[in-house]
């Protein structure tokens, strides 16, 4: 009987962790969907339209520069040049990895990427 209690406890904790992770994933997916990143088409989802600087706050550290360039329609080397990225795997490298390589906090680096996207949009918008 003594072995069943720790086993049940372990199973319960594992289930709880799984449910918390699932909840977090669903919240992120819902936020991206409401932001206009995805449109449902039956079982498949696809990007509905390019994102605008208003959507820049949705950027997260796990995203790659390749993804950011595509969804915000940035030139392939814009962020590389802006942040002087020497990483050979650019643009298929995450924002978090570059922030670590440059010894910057992820929050600071994310804010800088968001500001660069807004700056590009402002400079490329006809006045």
Image (cartoon, helix red, strand yellow):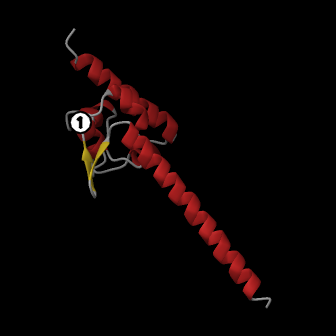
Name the quadrant of the C terminus: top left
Residue depicted at x 37% and y 26%:
54
* The furthest residue to the front: 42
Of residues 121 and 84, the one nearer the viewer is: 121
Instruction: Look at the picture and state if 13 lies above or below 1.
Output: above
Residue depicted at x 66% and y 72%:
12
Q: How many marks?
A: 1
Instruction: Look at the picture and state if 90 lies above or below 10.
Output: above
Neighbours of disc 1 within 10 Å: few (<14), some (14-19), many (20+):
few
Residue depicted at x 32% and y 28%:
117
* Location of residue 49 by image quarter: top left
Q: Which residue is mark 1?
A: 49
Q: Position of residue 33 (x, y in %)?
A: 37, 43
* The furthest residue to the bottom: 1
Q: Position of residue 23 (x, y in %)?
A: 53, 55
Whether residue 96 is visible, yes or no, is no
Of residues 2 and 72, the one nearer the viewer is: 2
Residue depicted at x 31% and y 44%:
38
Whether residue 12 is visible, yes or no, is yes
* The furthest residue to the right: 2
Q: Position of residue 66 (x, y in %)?
A: 26, 45
Q: Position of residue 93 (x, y in %)?
A: 33, 50
* Location of residue 122 by image quarter: top left
Name the quadrant of the N terminus: bottom right
Disc 1, SS = loop
* Location of residue 84 by image quarter: top left
Of residues 42 and 4, the one nearer the viewer is: 42
């Amino acid at each position: 009987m003594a072995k069943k209690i720790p086993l049940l406890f372990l199973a319960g904790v594992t289930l709880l962790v799984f449910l918390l992770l699932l909840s977090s994933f669903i919240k992120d997916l819902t936020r991206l969907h409401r932001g206009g990143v995805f449109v449902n088409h039956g079982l498949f989802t696809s990007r509905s339209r390019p994102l605008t600087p208003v959507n820049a706050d949705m950027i997260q550290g796990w995203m790659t520069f390749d993804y950011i360039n595509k969804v915000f329609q940035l030139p392939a080397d814009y962020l590389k040049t802006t942040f002087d990225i020497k990483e050979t795997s650019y643009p298929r490298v995450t924002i978090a990895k570059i922030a670590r390589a440059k010894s910057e906090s992820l929050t600071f680096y994310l804010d800088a990427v968001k500001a660069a996207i807004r700056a590009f949009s402002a400079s490329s918008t006809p006045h």
